[in-house]
Amino acid sequence: MSGPLRRFRTLPIRTRLSLLVAAAVAFAVAAVSLSCWFLVRDQLYNQLDEELHGEQVSSGLLQGMLRNCQLSDPQKIPQPPNSPIVTILYSDGSTCLNPANDTVRVESSDVAVADGLRRNSLHTSATTDGTPVRVYTLPVVDRATDQVQTGIAVSIAKPLEEVTKPLSSLAWILLLVSGVGVLGAGAAGLAVARTGLRPVDKLTAAVEHVARTEDLTVRIPVEDDSDDEIARLSRSFNSMTSALASSHDLQQQLIADAGHELRTPLTSLRTNIELLSRSEETGRPLPEADRKALLASVKAQMTELASLIGDLQELSRADDQRGERVQVVSLEDTVESALRRARLRGPELTITADLQPWYVRAEPAALERAVVNILDNAVKFSPGSGTVEVRLTGGVLTVRDHGPGIAEHELPHVFDRFWRSPSARALPGSGLGLSIVARTVQQAGGQVSLARAEGGGTVATVRLPGAPTPPPGTPVP
């Protein structure tokens, strides 16, 4: 059974649909045909039995048959066409019949009627030449006394051709109709499968085209008012290709921007290293001040390059790699840890903090890095001996500095990758810090924004949804 089933599963889906439709119709037609055939057969048998019950055998015929049977050479008694076969039988199993008729086999039920053990008998039998007949046996009644005569009965038989011939014709008709119905159902199923699977063919062609050409601009046309399974599948495919195209474009943009950003520190590193190498090769050492400046520049460029590579790794990390690291963490503790690092980077600044407890679902390391990036921006753009104000209340974290602020036309671009304002390009940084902040906050289900603060400076606002307050570090189920 597994072999045919396995072969069936390898057939094209439209062929399987056609076969299934044809099989279903064949089963239904077979059930109806068999039911019709059996109903007609029972009706014909009932009709034949009623005719046998209605047959009357005259006393004259019975007496004539009895006298004829006593002759040494019985004579054939003329009978009208299509008349029943009449047989007289005795309790000992012997019979008396018209020599013009075929002999009908005597059954035990017929003898029981002659013995007076049964009132009548109705069954199917056959003649000596094998012709099937329907036999009705009943006792002989004396017309004068209206008494049943024991020891003798009469059987009336009619050929079953009246039943078998119409049934045979009906069977052939039903078989022909069923065959035509099954073939028609198979053809209709194939047509329906072709029509219904035409959108699937388009989808398959689109997928094959994408796999062959990597062209993610392919779209499958979908009717706006259609909401069936094929339409939803087509819309899902279009959404998937749009998302892949967008991701591919962002990836290409990230690679191009990363290449552009990496070129600057690498060029500076190569220039500085070439100067140091040429000084060693020519035996003309650089002045000590110049040499220290070159080494400091190399160190700064290496630090910037390492920071840039780390930021790129953070941005390129797949979202499914963070699921196991998401925990319920205390945002208050995270901000406290980030503040300690910020105070080390800006010891001349005054950093005030007003923090209230708040728990969020996030990746602890990524969340702390995002907060550190926000504080680093505030430290970087704050004037000497300036103040940075940090506040956490009700899940809203605000970081306000008193620096030059951000121009109004630059605010829409602050979270773009590698974007840096003209005033910040001379400062260290990769232009990826706020992009990492935006991504981390978004993954935690929150929102982040930057705006110009009243009285000057910039205020960064992070809103994060709260989580239950189990002990910090509890893994997410």
Image: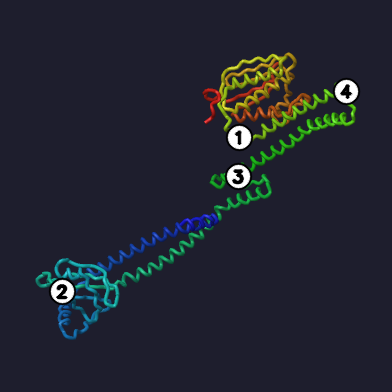
Q: Dot 2 lies on which element?
A: loop
Q: Dot 3 lies on which element?
A: helix
Query: Of residues 464 and 236, which is closer to you in this image?
Result: 464
Query: Of residues 212 and 280, which is closer to you in this image?
Result: 280
Q: Dot 4 lies on which element?
A: loop
* Label 3 close to label 4 by CB (< 8 Å): no
Q: Tell me: 186 left or right of 46.
A: right
* Label 3 close to label 1 by CB (< 8 Å): no
Q: Nearer the viewer, mark 3 or mark 1?
A: 1
Q: Is residue 159 above or below residue 210?
A: below
Q: CA distance from mark 2 to mark 3?
A: 89 Å
Q: Nearer the viewer, mark 4 or mark 1?
A: 4
Relative image position of residue 283 (x, y in whole percent): 89, 29
Q: Which mark is residue 237?
A: 3
Relative image position of residue 3 (x, y in whole percent): 49, 57
Q: Which mark is residue 321?
A: 1
Q: CA distance from mark 4 to mark 2?
A: 148 Å
Disc 2 designates what residue? 92
Relative image position of residue 240 (x, y in whole percent): 62, 42
Query: Of residues 28 and 429, which is closer to you in this image?
Result: 429
Sequence-first disc among 3 and 4: 3
Sequence-first disc among 2 and 3: 2
Q: Which mark is residue 430?
A: none
Residue 343 appears in which quarter of the rendering? top right
Disc 4 designates what residue? 287
Q: Which residue corresponds to the image point at 53% horizontal and 23% vertical from the top-left?
A: 471
Q: Dot 1 lies on which element?
A: helix
Sequence-first disc among 4 and 1: 4
Classify mark 4: residues with Cα within 10 Å, few (<14), some (14-19) or many (20+): few
Q: Nearer the viewer, mark 2 or mark 1?
A: 1
